Image: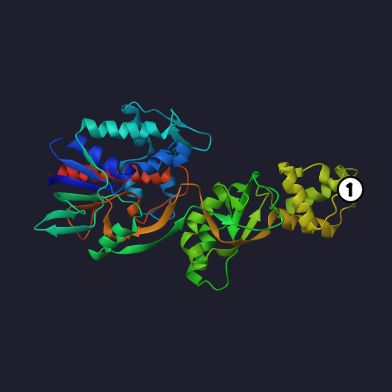
Amino acid sequence: MNYDVVVIGGGAAGFFTAINLAKQNQKLSVVIVERGAQVLEKVKISGGGRCNVTHAIFEPKPLTENYPRGQRELLGPFHTFLSGDTIAWFEERGVPLKIEDDGRMFPESNSSQTIINCFLEEAKIYNVEIKTKWPVINIENEGGNWELHSKNEKLNSKVVVVATGSNPKMLSLLQNKGIAITRAVPSLFTFNINDKRINELAGLSTLAEVSLEIPAELNAKKKAYLNQNLKYIRGPVLITHWGMSGPGILKLSAWGARILNELDYKFNLCVNWLPDFESEVLHEQLRDYKVELAKQTLHKWSPFDLPKRLWQSLLDASGVNHEKKWADITKIDIENLVKQLQNGIFQVDGKSTFKEEFVTAGGVNLKEIDFKTYQSKQHTNLYLVGEVLDIDAVTGGFNFQSAWTGGFIAANAIANSF
């Protein structure tokens, strides 16, 4: 069967490319081929079933700062299609978005099915064909046209768009075409920690600053990267039954993805539970409490707006008696308390996947791509969009925004090439 364009991958990036392309050049025959039985499966489960469509950052440079990989390459594309363009695109199709307090944006319906229905309707309007259970097992370029082989069928097309996410089989096929692939490792994961300071605190969340204690065995370049990117990452930290999670931890896991993989996910985590206090100010405040709260026992009231259970646990870790009155704390007590409050060291031993939000760092090397069009520099009429590229972000709708941007730019380029 012959098509003008075959899009491999029925996910967010694949659909956004196909429907924008089919709208812009309605003479083209466009088909999406998906190896699974259903399309848009990751869209369905993302954001706890609500679909975190994008993030309310409306300037290209600040937006790029949420991408550990792809930060430099996305600057140009974001000048073409940014978060505001995403909002307008969905609103034009009857899908208004809302901004939550942390900047994340969801459909007002609070249902990912709204996004899925929108895509399926657009595909129907513009005659985008959808083939499920169609795994691509080989790609060949014959006389300037592409041949795609499945188990029992072959498709021919002028243009191929690869939007398969981190599918290792597709990455292997691309590598066989001479395209450089950066090895995929997990990103966005939580930390396994067995520590008596937090073992009884599951469900507790508080603002903290986290950083990686830099291992001596790393080379100078990697130490410099850690110092630049993994120092003083601030965000809510959630204590779980297995260790720590929450935005602060996930951000650290994203920026540290490759080095943490190299360390086999065994490293020391530094936690500052009071990131708004300078150390000297904290010392002074504790000395002031000796006078202001002289007759109160330490454990009855949690200072600094810390959760009370965390404060009591850190008292234990400091070796300070719960029943001690503030008037009786010593200089050594204050030193030990400050250490636990601002420089607690937790040993991480392994990782856990963050719900269904599985993201990898790795994929097609970014030097392979012309980011004005998202076309392969080596192969004419081969375009690559979405998470098949070595681009990934922290949580908050940023990975989807990269998919929308790449899909829109690729669609423009393809539509104008016919």
Q: Is residue 417 visible?
A: no
- Circle 1 is placed at which residue position? 325
Could you say where residue 18 lies in the image, as x and y percent from the top left?
Answer: 24, 41
Could you say where residue 134 lies in the image, as x and y percent from the top left?
Answer: 24, 48
Q: Would you say 6 lies left or right of 362 here?
A: left
Could you say where residue 354 lies in the image, as x and y percent from the top left?
Answer: 51, 49
Q: Which residue is at the front of the view, 1 or 108? A: 1
Q: Residues within 10 Å of mark 1 (few under 14, many from 20)?
A: some
* Quadrant of the rendering where the C terminus is positioned: top left
Point 82% across, 46% down: residue: 299
Total number of numbered discs in the rendering: 1
Residue that protrudes farthest toward the left in the picture: 143
Q: Would you say 122 lies left or right of 87 here?
A: left
Q: Would you say 118 lies left or right of 376 here?
A: right
Tell me the amino acid under the disc marked 1. Answer: Lys
Could you say where residue 395 lies in the image, as x and y percent from the top left?
Answer: 47, 46
Location of residue 293 with respect to 343 vertically, above or below = above
Q: Is residue 299 visible?
A: yes
Residue that protrudes farthest toward the top in the picture: 94
Q: Which residue is at the front of the view, 40 or 337? A: 40
Q: Would you say 356 lies left or right of 18 here?
A: right
